[in-house]
Image (spheres, rainbow, N blue to C red):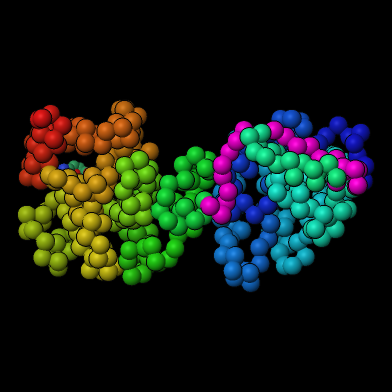
Amino acid sequence: MNKSNSDRKIAIYGGSFDPIHVGHVALAEAAVREIRLDKLIFMPAYISPFKKDLKSTNGKDRCGMIETVLPLNEAFCLSEYELKKGGEASYTIETLQYFDSLTDAELYFVLGFDSVIDLDKWYKGEEILRTYPLITGRRPDTDDSEGMRIIESFRKKYGANISVLEMEPVDAASSEIREMVKNGEPITGLVTEGVESYIVEHDLYKAKNASYCEDIEALERFMKDNLKDTRYRHSLGVEKMAVKLAGIYGANVDKAAFAGRYHDIAKCFDQEKMDDHIRKYSLDEGLIGNPALAHSKVGAAILEHEFGVTDNDILNAVKYHTTARKNMSLLEQITFVADVVEDNRTYPDLKYYQDLAASNIDQCTLEILEYTISDLTEKWRRIDKDTLQAYEYYNNKLFKS
Ligand code: DGI
Ligand code: FE
Ligand code: FE
């Protein structure tokens, strides 16, 4: 239907969005801005679960990631039309015809540059080219003369209306992002912060052997059953912050995520349960009656004995996350610091400590210890020997030369 006289413009942006990355968002924003779209509908494609070679994320999570970018632009919205339709028959031409029949607006189709130049090979691709105005983007710094030549030939041959928007160079590809997450490499900058958090919180793209315990599902259940809501959110916040710091300082991102996520696994035990575990695992008797101090030691013991965690660095990161100790490993230090500076914390100097954590982790460690010691002193509570030794150690490390 030719509706080029319509004053409303709607676009459908199709793709796998596995995950949606900054390149997708940049193209969507440019399309809204330059074509003056009233609405841009992200349309994640249905991917058959039988395509076993293409291990793809389920539709729910791909939508969940898209949802986090919707607030970036008033025109953005999401449709589950193709996902709900499912099956083999999810052809673009049918989606476009369906939406076209629903609206008086002029309907555009947004797609990546590489997809446009392939379009005549799609099912009824020629009809798409003849019928619907297309929007794509190109990076000004790449040689795409071959692609532009093909686009020009589509214009001549089919009268195709193709807008090629000049884009900021963004180096993001979903397949590479999945691979990076799997390898424990940071993806900051390649996806928006919201998508990055979503990937961490939903454990997407992880190789199953990248987990460090025998039964990750059982551990997840244990965590959900034993932590209050705010403590659960705090744990995810520590995981996210630990991943960020691991990226900055070159620690193993997967181990940082694991230690961060499960560091407080025993935090919500009542005193009786805590004390039972101290006896059961023959931990220091001095911990009895002191759950604030015991939860880190008990947590490490549970991870080791009930969930088969064998990695000593992870176990020590959990064990010393409350007190710290002298000469911590990078992972221990990251866990200790991430616990205090994660995003859900609400004390007034949070931003200061977050910046310090990212720029000088030793000094951040020292300042946290300094605060802990003065706070405990004020409250007349006993200060653990590891805390005191850690303070002395990091003080010497920073100020003695
Ligand atoms: O578990 P979180 O609340 O996330 O944080 P955390 O594991 O650092 O625990 C904080 C609590 O631990 C807080 O109540 C103070 C206490 N704490 C930290 N270091 C010491 C300590 N308590 C004693 N008695 N001695 C310490 O050296
Ligand atoms: Fe803790
Ligand atoms: Fe904590």
Locate residue 99 relative to residue 27 in the image: left or right.
right
**Residue 124: horizontal and vertical position, in percent?**
85, 58
From where the camera sits, is residue 230 visible? Answer: no
367 or 190: nearer the viewer: 190
Magenta range: 154-176
Residue 98 in the image, given as x and y percentages of width and height: 83, 53
Does the magenta-highlighted stretch encompass residue 168?
yes
User: In this picture, is 26 found above or below 216?
Assistant: above
Residue at the (68%, 57%) spot, across then down: 45
Asked if the stretch drawn in magenta spans residue 97, the answer is no
> Where residue 207 appears, x then y in whole percent?
44, 63
Q: Residue at x 85, y 45 (%)?
A: 153
Question: What is the total number of numbered labels drawn onto the structure image?
Answer: 0
Residue 131 placed where, x, y %? 89, 47
Query: Looking at the picture, does residue 274 appear above or below residue 146?
Result: below
Can I make out residue 356 in this image? yes
Image side of residue 144 versus residue 279, left or right: right
Q: Quadrant of ligand 1?
A: top left
